[in-house]
Image: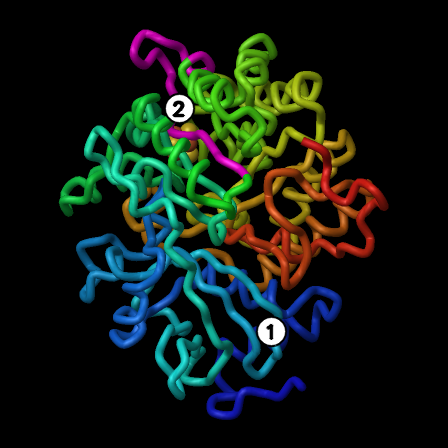
Amino acid sequence: MSQMPTETTSAAVIAELERMFAMFPDLPKEAIIKQDILRQGLAFAESALQVASGYKPKDYFIFSFDLVPLKEMQVYEAYRSPEEIRMTGGPYDLLPTIVSVRVNPDSPYRVEIHEGHISLLCEGALLARLEFPPIPDYYSAQLTSGKKISQIAPAIEWGYLVYLTVYRLCQYWGKTEECRFCDLNENYRQQKEQGREYTAVKSIEDIVEAMAFINQHDTVSRAYTVTGGSITSSLQGMKEAEWYARYADAIESRFAGRWIPKAVVQAFPKEETKLLREAGYRIYHPNFEIWDRELFSWICPGKERYVGRDEWMKRIVDAADVFGPERVIPNFVGGVEMARPHGFTEIDRAIASTTEGLEFFMSKGIIPRFTTWCPEPTSDLGRQEGPPLEYFVKLLYAWRSTFEKYNLSAPPGYGRPGVGSAEFSVSAFMDVIRVERLPKGREIAEV
Ligand code: SF4
């Protein structure tokens, strides 16, 4: 039975959640709360951090995804907080919902031990009981190189996805090239500064050895992502497509079909895209980050300069001929279109722009997905408030409406769709899919 939180029902955050529940009654409450947590981050009580030591920690699998830099974490949350939380129950009777952890000591969402349980409180009121993700069985393995397997092949999405950031730097460099929301290069610097083992270029040998351990000891992972920064010139004498292709080639030649192989790299000309497909990747993510033409050139100056916005979008469409449209899943950074100082200032105009992009791709069978913009303090956009919750709720609604309009299958390589089942943790797009409305017999697109 649902009941209202009792302690701080007049609190602003709860009031805004309830306003959104009322405005969009056919979106799951779980998805709305998840978006707000991703937007505002999580604070941790010392008692919760002590419990978290028995669970899978945040491995900083690519960006920092934190709202404060490591050096401002007073209780070393970077080393002690879990990768994700799973919320259940509470006053809204939530179905199990997995949310990625973004550290923000000032967040109104606070993880505490409450009545003997790990719990999520919002402005002092209980919102949900929590679980933390288990440490994968393979994490105890030791690689021959001496590197930690958790550093080479961390698991996210409650163990579903092995995340292989094989190149932790990006050759788009500095203000005139780096995507303005991105802290990949800065995060690498801060992690090294803090003494964390953080390998810039992961060797094929380490990756293959790690995947062999996972193959042997793990039954949860179903997909892997190979990704890293862009390579504008060459790396170890290779161009980007060739360099990244080698990883799937090495894994698939040993463990063909064991996982769904995914590549998150630049939008390549068709011939180079084919190299990825031939190497074994089944899913291609040429992320376009933002749809609006002018904002694209501001937010992604490197991509604009080296490829160009229209050519980038054309390459995404061309990739559908190589992978099949449902296996081309470009990401955009939900919310960055409202970044200051040049972004949209009105929610509805921002949503209209992004919906144009959703229409463009989904009408062709390509399914863009989004992550939730986290204004990372060391990125060029720096500390600023992201868009309000209403923006994200409208984005979820627009995404689902366009998705249903074209009668699309759920994207493959993203775990299960639907509220209570979704594993994807950095936005709620998988949580809002209405499973009963998916095309019969092809609920999830084939890999
Ligand atoms: S291409 Fe952009 S988002 Fe990707 S790593 Fe480089 S700067 Fe970051």
The one of 61 and 134 positioned closer to us in this rendering:
134
Q: Is residue 226 above or below residue 419?
A: above
**Which residue sits at x=54%, y=87%?**
5
> Circle 2: is it few (<14), some (14-19), or many (20+) Cα within 10 Å?
many
Q: Amino acid at mark 2?
A: Ser
Looking at marks 1 and 2 on the same chain, the residue that comes earlier in the sequence is marked by: 1
Query: In the rendering, at what x and y percent does residue 28 appear?
Result: 67, 66
Label 2 CB, ligand 1: below 8 Å? yes
Confirm whether the magenta stretch covers residue 365.
no
**Which residue sits at x=53%, y=38%?**
223
* Residue 397 located left or right of residue 248: right
> Circle 1: is it few (<14), some (14-19), or many (20+) Cα within 10 Å?
many
**Which residue sits at x=46%, y=85%?**
125
* Residue 372 located left or right of residue 76: right
Confirm whether the magenta stretch covers residue 226.
yes
Query: In the rendering, at what x and y percent does residue 152 appear?
Result: 32, 36
Instruction: Look at discs 1 and 2 and give the one toward the viewer.
Output: 1
Q: Amino acid at mark 1?
A: Leu
* Residue range of the region highlighted in magenta in the rendering: 223-242
Residue 310: name its quadrant: top right
Labelled disc at residue 42: none
Residue 385 visible somewhere in the drawing: no
For the residues labelled 1 and 2, the Cα–Cα distance comes to 39 Å
The image quadrant where one finds ligand 1 is top left
The one of 88 and 75 positioned closer to us in this rendering:
88
The residue pinned by badge 1 equals 94
Disc 2 secondary structure class:
loop
Q: Is residue 399 above or below residue 86?
A: above
Labelled disc at residue 230: 2
